[in-house]
């Protein structure tokens, strides 16, 4: 169990909070590039801040605080004008650096705009997603994780409904294989008791490798610190902290080309999944029946019913929770590293090659590798959706 203070230390994500300052040292997904190319302006809530991501007429991407410096109207309703975005209320114009370029109602020759500095964050594209960096400058490099950078992988993006829970709850699930049998119905695979002779967890330079032990095979894939579940199979999950009580899940799904040649995919398609309407019974309790027929719905039930920001002081952890304990210790340690001004785990500043993670299935008895099924060679076609709140 954790004290209230220790729980707050690892969960709170707003500006000035300990975990929030750690998370700001990493590039965070904001939106699919294809979506912003189409809609031009889109509201975003990230790490407790209300923002807008946009593309100007020069093809540059920006992420700005949503409320205009003038009278606090929302830039999410603004319009793109050349090299910037104009506030819909009085037309103040900002560029991707946060500089105020124009104030239409000011006297000719006024230099007042030069004194205005709007909150702005760098934006870069990787793997079809726009990423933002909200931490101290200079910004590190976006890691060339395989799901973002492999040239022979064709990609698509799924954006799932907002979760009404803190980001740590889904991340702890990433190192919790004990739930598979009971929550996901693996009655023919995962055992309901983990064997004592298997090493299920291994720390490495980007997080924690976790192994699922099935009757005849061992499946291994990583939690990529701080907020990515890589795999199993052909997918990576980004668990994006919107604020202390809400989390956005984005998937990157990929297909290797059959012959290993570079893909000719020009634009990564995206799709919004849901929204799944929350229903309540006569007593005001949430009903999850309609969500319990998918893995994502089953996980959402387990995470949300712990509470929006669960009280870890009432827990009674057991041996099967060793992965969760490992992640919490890692998170706590890296919070200290960031607070002391260091680069936390996995932050890269030097050019590097594609980082290929160990995502594998092996025969438990012979050690032979078992191939993944069902994805290789399939083409992803254009598939887009309407944003949901």
Image (cartoon, grey):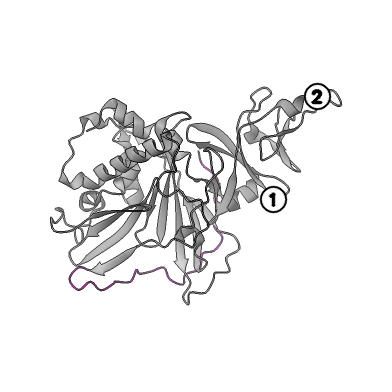
Q: From the viewer's perspective, is residue 39 above or below residue 268?
A: above
Q: Residue at x 34, y 55 (%)?
A: 222
Residue holding disc 1: 59
Of 233 and 202, the residue lying toward us: 202
Can you say whether 177 is above or below 18 in the image? below
Gap in Å between the C-alphas at discs 1 and 2?
Answer: 28 Å
x, y percentage for residue 207? 35, 51
Q: Is residue 245 visible?
A: no
Direction right: furthest residue: 108
SS for callout 1: loop
Quadrant assignment, res 339: top left
- Secondary structure predominantly adopted by residues drawn in magenta: loop
Quadrant of res 186? bottom left
Whether residue 250 is situated above or below residue 2 in the rendered picture: below
Residue located 56% across and 42% down the image: 138
Name the residue tied to disc 2. Answer: 105
Whether residue 383 is in magenta: the answer is yes
Q: Position of residue 237 (x, y in %)?
A: 41, 51
């Amino acid at each position: 169990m954790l004290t209230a203070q220790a729980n707050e230390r690892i969960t709170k994500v707003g500006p000035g909070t300990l975990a929030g300052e750690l998370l700001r040292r990493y590039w965070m997904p904001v939106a699919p590039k294809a979506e912003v190319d189409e809609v031009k302006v889109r509201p975003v809530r990230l790490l407790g801040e209300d923002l807008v991501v946009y593309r100007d007429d020069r093809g540059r991407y920006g992420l700005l605080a949503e409320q205009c410096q003038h009278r606090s109207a929302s830039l999410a309703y603004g319009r793109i004008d050349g090299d910037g975005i104009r506030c819909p209320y009085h037309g103040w114009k900002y560029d991707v650096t946060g500089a105020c370029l124009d104030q239409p109602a000011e006297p000719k020759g006024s230099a007042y705009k030069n004194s205005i500095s709007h909150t702005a964050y760098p934006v870069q594209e990787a793997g079809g997603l726009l990423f933002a960096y909200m931490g101290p400058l200079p910004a590190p490099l976006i890691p060339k994780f395989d799901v973002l950078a492999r040239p022979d992988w064709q990609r698509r993006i799924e954006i799932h409904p907002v979760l009404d829970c803190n980001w740590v709850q889904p991340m702890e699930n990433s190192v919790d294989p004990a739930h598979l049998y009971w929550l996901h119905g693996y009655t023919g695979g995962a055992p309901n008791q983990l064997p004592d002779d298997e090493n299920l967890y291994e720390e490495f330079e980007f997080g924690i490798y976790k192994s699922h032990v099935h009757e005849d095979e061992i499946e291994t894939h990583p939690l990529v610190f701080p907020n990515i579940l890589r795999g199993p199979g052909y997918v990576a999950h980004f668990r994006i902290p919107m604020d202390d009580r809400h989390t956005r899940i984005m998937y990157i799904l990929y297909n290797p080309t059959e012959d290993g040649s570079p893909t000719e995919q020009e634009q990564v398609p995206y799709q919004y999944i849901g929204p799944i309407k929350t229903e309540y019974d006569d007593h005001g309790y949430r009903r999850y029946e309609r969500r319990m027929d998918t893995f994502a719905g089953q996980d959402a039930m387990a995470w949300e019913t712990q509470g929006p920001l669960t009280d870890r002081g009432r827990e009674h952890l057991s041996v099967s929770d060793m992965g969760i304990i490992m992640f919490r210790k890692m998170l706590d340690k890296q919070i200290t590293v960031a607070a002391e001004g260091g680069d936390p785990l996995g932050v890269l500043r030097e050019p590097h090659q594609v980082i290929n993670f160990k995502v594998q299935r092996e025969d438990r008895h012979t050690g032979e590798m078992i191939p993944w099924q069902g994805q290789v060679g399939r083409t992803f076609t254009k598939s887009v959706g309407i944003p949901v709140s």
